[in-house]
């Protein structure tokens, strides 16, 4: 046992460290860990029991300060514990996402996150909608939600960072709402090979090809409205291009999971070059 810190008292009268109660309520039924009474409080933001705080500080001042540091370290990982939405398509950072939520587990999800982090884990799943350690997806952030009278919801979201699953579980009493603990997954640093071209040069060439393609098809305004302006950073540019270009379905997921910005840009470059060449006027012999 350890000294209670950031104490939260449940409606049934039992008190717990905030981090302990958060962990319990996320992975188990919404019940008090001691007496199993119904407990639907938002443990992350529920008010502290000031009396217990004062007693713990007065009796064990040094230990309480040490526990505060430990608790703050644990709380830093809360933003990386997310409910999972499964779908059989691959999206990339910067992709827009529109969903009609009707399954009971996703109704629970939207009601949880709309008043909390406003984020969930979008996970491409092509075999049984099951999560596994190591699976890669994107974190989606809510922009707007419309709740319907029967409990369904329409949401608009934007895909942000890419993640990899470290741990996953199904929350009791939610009819199958999956959760995961994740780590953010940036690309590996690119080492410039002898005789190879620099990453900024490749990114600049991709930008020029994209401009040429847009000059032919005239869709730049629509793309920027839905996906935002084209980024300058090579890694962000590679994801943005994957999101806006007509990538073949089977090729999308490998582009999400690869940690090579160069590999991703080269695929986009080839696709854009083919499009530009196909739409360029050809001189008759």
Image: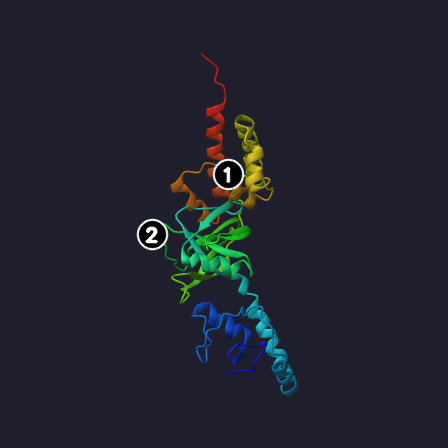
Q: Helix, strand, or loop for circle 1? A: helix
Furthest residue in direction front, as rendered: 149
Number of the label disc, if any, that sits on residue 244: 1
Indicate which disc, 1 or 2, sits on the residue closer to the N terminus: 2
Q: Name the residue under label 2.
A: 127
Picture quadrant of residue 103: bottom left
Q: Position of residue 241 (x, y in %)?
A: 52, 39
**Measured from the top left, where is residue 77 in percent x and y?**
54, 65
From the viewer's side, name the closer residue of 62 and 91: 91
Which residue does the image show at 54% across and 62% down from the upper left? 79
Residue at image point 53% right, 78% down: 16
Give neighbour class at mark 2: few <14, some 14-19, many 20+ (Cα, 10 Å). Answer: few
Q: Nearer the viewer, residue 177 or 205?
A: 177
Question: Relative to 191, is 285 on the left or the right?
Answer: left
Above or below 198: residue 17: below
Q: Relative to 105, is 198 above or below?
A: above
Nearer the observer, 179 or 71: 179
How many numbered discs sit on the rendered protein? Answer: 2
Looking at the rendered structure, the secondary structure element under dot 2 is loop
Q: Is residue 193 visible?
A: no
Query: Which residue is outermost to the top?
Result: 285
Q: Distance between the residues labelled 1 and 2?
A: 25 Å
């Amino acid at each position: 046992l350890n000294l209670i810190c950031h104490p939260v008292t449940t409606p049934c009268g039992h008190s717990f460290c905030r981090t302990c109660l958060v962990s319990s309520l996320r992975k188990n039924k919404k019940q008090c860990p001691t007496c199993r009474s119904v407990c639907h409080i938002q443990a992350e933001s529920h008010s502290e029991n000031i009396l217990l705080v004062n007693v713990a500080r007065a009796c064990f001042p040094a230990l309480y300060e040490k526990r505060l540091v430990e608790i703050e370290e644990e709380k830093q990982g809360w933003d990386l514990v997310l409910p999972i939405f499964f779908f059989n398509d691959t999206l990339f950072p910067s992709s827009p996402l529109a969903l009609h939520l009707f399954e009971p587990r996703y109704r629970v999800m939207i009601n949880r996150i709309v008043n909390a982090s406003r984020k969930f884990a979008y996970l491409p799943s092509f075999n049984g909608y099951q999560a596994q350690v190591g699976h890669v997806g994107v974190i989606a952030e809510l922009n707007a939600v419309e709740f319907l009278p029967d409990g369904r919801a329409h949401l608009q979201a934007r895909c942000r960072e890419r993640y990899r699953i470290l741990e996953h579980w199904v929350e009791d009493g939610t009819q199958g709402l999956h959760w995961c603990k994740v780590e953010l997954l940036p690309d590996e640093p690119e080492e410039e090979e002898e005789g190879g071209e620099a990453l900024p040069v490749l990114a600049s060439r991709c930008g020029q090809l994209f401009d040429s393609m847009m000059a032919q098809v005239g869709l730049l305004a629509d793309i920027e409205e839905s996906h935002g302006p084209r980024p300058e950073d090579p890694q962000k540019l590679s994801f943005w291009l994957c999101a806006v270009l007509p990538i073949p379905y089977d090729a999308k997921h490998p582009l999400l999971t690869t940690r090579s910005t160069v590999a991703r840009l080269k695929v986009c470059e080839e696709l854009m070059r083919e499009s530009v060449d196909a739409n360029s006027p050809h001189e008759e012999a």
